[in-house]
Structure formats: C-alpha cells, structure tokens
Amino acid sequence: MKRVLYTMPAVMVVIFYGMLALLAGGFASFQIRAWLMIVMPVASAVLLLAGLWWGCVPGMCLGGLLISMGLYGGSNLAMIGGGAVFAYYLVMGILCFADVRKNTR
C-alpha cells in the first residue's frame, strides 16, 4: 500500500505533463521549471521506493517551489497546493523512516 502512496504524485505529474506536451507540441517547449516539476516527484518516488527516508526532500522542495510561485505570482491556489505537496512528502518521509526503522530491528 505504501508503494502506491510513494509513486502516486509522480504518476499524476507524468500523465499531466505528458498530455500537456501532446497539446503544446512536444517536451522541447517546456521551461526549466516544468522540467523540475517533472523530475522532482519522480526522483522522490524512486528514492522512497528504495527505502531511503530522505527521498522526501525533492518532493518537499517541489512544495517549496510551488509556495514561492504562489507568493510571488499572486496565485493563492499554487500556495495552497504547495503546502499540501510539502505536507504530503513530509508524511511520506516519516512513514518511510518508521518502516525502515521497524525493519532494521
């Protein structure tokens, strides 16, 4: 069950940006921020699946990026979403840490 929770945001981001790339004419039209928003959840999912609790850090950075975009862009939706992403990856990191700690004893 936890494996599904670790990979769910990465799968959703890849599907969303994949559909967006089809509509926009390819991945070459993406800016660097969009590439970061694709790579961070995927890297976080891979690291969490490997049992590394600090794999939540790229996801938390993504949440921080969304919060800063909301603060400086004026979008409250991005700020709220960033807070939710940050909290989600924080909880996933805690769950992974507890799972690794339980299995090492």
Image: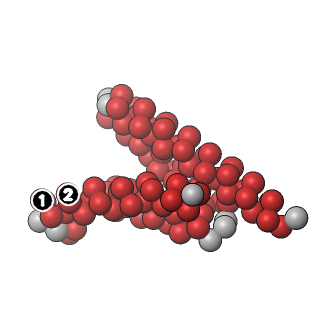
Query: Residue 96 occupies which quadrant of the picture?
Result: bottom right
> SS of the residue at dot 1?
helix
Q: Residue at x 15, y 64 (%)?
A: 22
Name the spot of residue 104 as percent of width and height, x first: 83, 67
Q: Residue at x 42, y 64 (%)?
A: 39
In front here: 74 or 5?
5
Do the numbered discs 2 and 1 sit on residues whose CB atoms are within 8 Å?
yes
In front here: 12 or 71?
12
Name the spot of residue 62 as percent of width and height, x first: 46, 50
Query: Residue 73 occupies which quadrant of the picture?
Result: top left
Q: Amino acid at mark 1?
A: Leu
Q: Is residue 1 left or right of residue 78?
A: right
Read off the residue under disc 2.
Answer: 20
Circle 2: is it few (<14), some (14-19), or many (20+) Cα within 10 Å? Answer: some
Mark 2 to mark 1 CA distance (whole Å): 5 Å
**Label disc, if present, on residue 23 of the rendered structure:** 1
Name the spot of residue 93 as percent of width and height, x first: 64, 53
Q: Where, quadrant-wise, is the N terminus in this rendering? A: bottom right
Q: Amino acid at mark 2?
A: Leu
Name the spot of residue 9 as percent of width and height, x first: 43, 54
> SS of the residue at dot 2?
helix
Q: Residue furthest right?
A: 105
In front here: 101 or 61?
101
Q: Where, quadrant-wise, is the C terminus in this rendering? A: bottom right
Q: Is residue 77 above or below residue 101?
A: above
